[in-house]
Amino acid sequence: MIESISPELQKFYDIFEEIDKGKISEFKDFLEANAVNFNLFKDGNFIERSFPFDMIPRIIPKDEFDHLEAGIIQRVKALNAFLNDIYGEQRIIADGIVPREYVDSAVGFLPEFMNVVPPQMIRTHISGIDLVKDSVSGEWVILEDNLRVPSGVSYPLSIRRAFRHTYPEFFESMKISKLKQYGDQLKAAMDYVNTGGLNVVLTPGRYNSAYYEHSYLAKITGSTLALGEDLVVENDEVFLRSYDGKHQRVGAIYRRLDDDFLDPEVFHPESLIGVPHLASAYRAGNVAIMNSIGNGVADDKGIYYFVPQMVKYYLDEEPLLKNAPTYLPYYEKDREYVLANIDTLVIKDVAEAGGYGVLFGNRLSPEQREEIIQMIIDDPRRFIAQEVIEFYDLPCMINGEIVPRKADLRAYVICGEEVSVSMGGLTRFAMEEGNYLVNSSQGGGFKDTWVVEL
Amino acid sequence: MTNSMAISVNTAQRLYWLGRYVQRAETLLRELVSSYDYVIDRDTDDGRKLYAKLGVDIDYVNALDFLKQGIYGDHGSSIESIITWARENAIETRHLLDERGFATLNKIYNHIVAGRDGRVSPTSLEEMIDDFALILGIFSSELERPRAYHFIRLGQQIERFDLILRLYQGVDFVTSEWETMGAIAKGLNEHYQPVEFSASSIGDALEKVNSVIDRVIMVTLPTASQTQG
């Protein structure tokens, strides 16, 4: 279902009718010429692929965005406070808001980093908050908080330039929020936590799926792009091996690799892309790691349930944005509801990620249904259950026709001295009608996202 | 707090090789087009002789086939592989490169890959030569990151020497330009110890030319006393 047309979208369509559609191919040319790609390995072969782009933007009216922005800022502040608390005093557990079991069993919780205080107490430097707009309530709903290494921001930033070049008409006659400041905000956030020395973007290298983005972010922030082998830790300080033999001190690392690969001395010993002893430098407070180590506990599926309560607990505010309705079988009341309504719910295994361990209740055979019910009864902490959200489709131009496709929104949030939400974000849509999977790895495409003021 | 940018060993090497491969592609394309004219009606063996100087045996049935072999042949001096390597080095350093320069190189690559099964047109090769000159020009006008450009320039200069020695035994040319190159090297690394250029043979000269970079990029780890913040 497509949302009714807002006056802002109508304005887009009015201009859209007049423009030279022949120039739409310029977007593809731009993405190809500039190798705005993501990388993947398929059947053992390395492939660079461009992300399909649809020129009809997602348009969010300014007042609607203002509300979203406030809700997202609130949420990220609460999540940052939660992480500081969990790796410190754990007051939220002591006060009975979050059960200890959920923290201890979260895969991303790293108790070996207890009592490490990151520079400026910031842990969620860059977050990617995934939202959809519910077609039943008409409200935005948060699906996931990505607090580890969220990617994708380079696509809307890159395409915006092409859009302005190809169709300036829209930007001349509509008040569309600018995205340009993202690089400055990211740099300011790096400078804010920098302990003295270089800002570095740490990449796993050219074959990583998001390598384009790593180099793009290094460019727009004026940071040094480095591989693990370019960095060396001496006396708990991090240095970049400069080509002239000098070692230059590093003060902040925007790392684009997961915790598991960051330091072979602490995590996977076979990791070749990490930096030995980096965790010691982090523990000693000598370098800012962006995002901090151990953030996975806060974007865990089981912990997600508690985020609205975190907002109340840490900020003493009412949450402005809702979660998807979620039930924890751990609580008796929720368990009864889940077992009685399993046919209409989505059941997720909290230990699984990337779309694995997700079961749709309405697609279970009677045997599977009995099996999952027994599993929930035996180990209720292992599962969460959610209502299925019928989120809006967006109009997409596919093969010259405007058709509805499911789409989500990833909002990028930078946490420095201030918390700021990028005035746009990444809108991803599914290529086939009715498909809910919008991931680029599932063949989805992307749109520009315009915050528009009439 | 110093928040300037640094250039890692890896990046420095990539920039240097980007300069070399772009220069190599441009020079070999010129040679290819000029040899093509010879192959048509002056000396059918001219193409074979050209590639023999590069240590490559090639075979062809006519002038167009010679071009095809030069561009797509299964050897390390094919234009396709040189451009592929130029692009790989550009991808790893594109955060330091002018976007239009990068896109121009990438478009050449896309064009070359797309044309693999088609006929090679000498005219489009000439356009490509112009594009390479354009890329180098664009990089040279990048004022924001002069050090990055100087690595490209050093690579370019070293590659010119290398090819002039291999193709034309041009020891005199190298001698006359040696100090200019040395100034770029010194500008990149204040501790650069100049290589004396006196050549007893072409092989000896090539070795000297190719040893310069190891005095600019220090691959070995210095001791802790050499580190500085």
Image (cartoon, coloured by chain):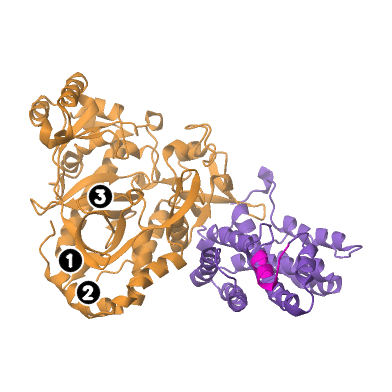
Chain colours: A orange, B purple
- Amino acid, disc 3: Asp
Residue A98 in sight: no
Q: Is residue B60 magenta?
A: yes
Residues at discs 1 and 2 in contact (Cβ within 8 Å): yes
Element under disc 1: helix
Task: Please report the bounds of the magenta region as a residue range.
Answer: B59-70
- Amino acid, disc 2: Lys
Percent across and percent down for residue A123 are: 35, 44
Element under disc 3: strand
Q: Chain of mark 1?
A: A
User: Residue visible at 25% across and 25% down?
Assistant: A101
Q: Alpha-carbon distance for marks 1 and 3?
A: 19 Å
Residue holding disc 3: A130
Q: Nearer the viewer, mark 2 or mark 3?
A: 3
Determine the main secondary structure of the stretch shown in magenta: helix
Residues at discs 1 and 3 in contact (Cβ within 8 Å): no
Mark number displayed over residue A175:
2
